[in-house]
Amino acid sequence: MKKTTKKTTAAAKAVAPKAAALKAVTAPTAAPKKAPAKKTTAATAPVAVRKKEAALREAPATFISARIDIGFGNHLYVRGEGPGLSWDHGVAMDCIAADGWAHTMKGATSPVIFKVLINDEVWSKGHDYVVEPGQSVSITPTF
């Protein structure tokens, strides 16, 4: 029996390197796994950013409406101090009627000071208008 075992062992030894080589060739190579990208959450965002986002979510919208017929083909603009406004460039108001214009602002935390212009060129007469955050104001400007 020893002879049989030796022959089997010798045959097994001759086949074993070939089987190992086949396994090495056919075995899929696993790519190294990368860690998932870190996501910025509300908890990891800087405190100032979180406070600003919370203020924008909590602040109610401020509405400006103007009742004036400025003629077909003209457009009413608003300029001032407030979210999205500047004194240098106007923001187009939405035409809601033949003599009605509206603008909505979100995120106002202080009084909004503004004036309206025809075609962003001709300023309305009189003093600047003021509306408190979250309030609505309806004006009838003169030019």
Image (cartoon, rainbow, N blue to C red):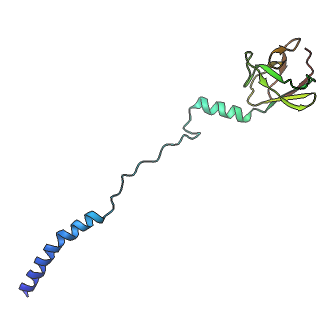
Image coordinates of residue 129 in percent, x first then y, are: 85, 17
Residue lying at 93% horizontally and 24% vertically, measured from the top left = 69
Q: Quadrant of residue 20?
A: bottom left
Q: Quadrant of residue 125?
A: top right
Identity of the residue furthest to the front in this view = 73
Q: Is residue 16 above or below residue 106?
A: below
Image coordinates of residue 143 in percent, x first then y, are: 90, 14
Q: Is residue 67 left or right of residue 56?
A: right
Q: Is residue 14 above or below residue 137?
A: below
Nearer the observer, 86 or 36: 86
Residue lying at 75% horizontally and 27% vertically, measured from the top left = 108
Q: Quadrant of the N terminus?
A: bottom left
Image coordinates of residue 83 in percent, x first then y, are: 73, 25
Residue lying at 82% horizontally and 27% vertically, measured from the top left = 93
Residue lying at 93% horizontally and 21% vertically, measured from the top left = 140
Q: Quadrant of residue 23?
A: bottom left
Q: Is residue 51 above or below residue 123?
A: below
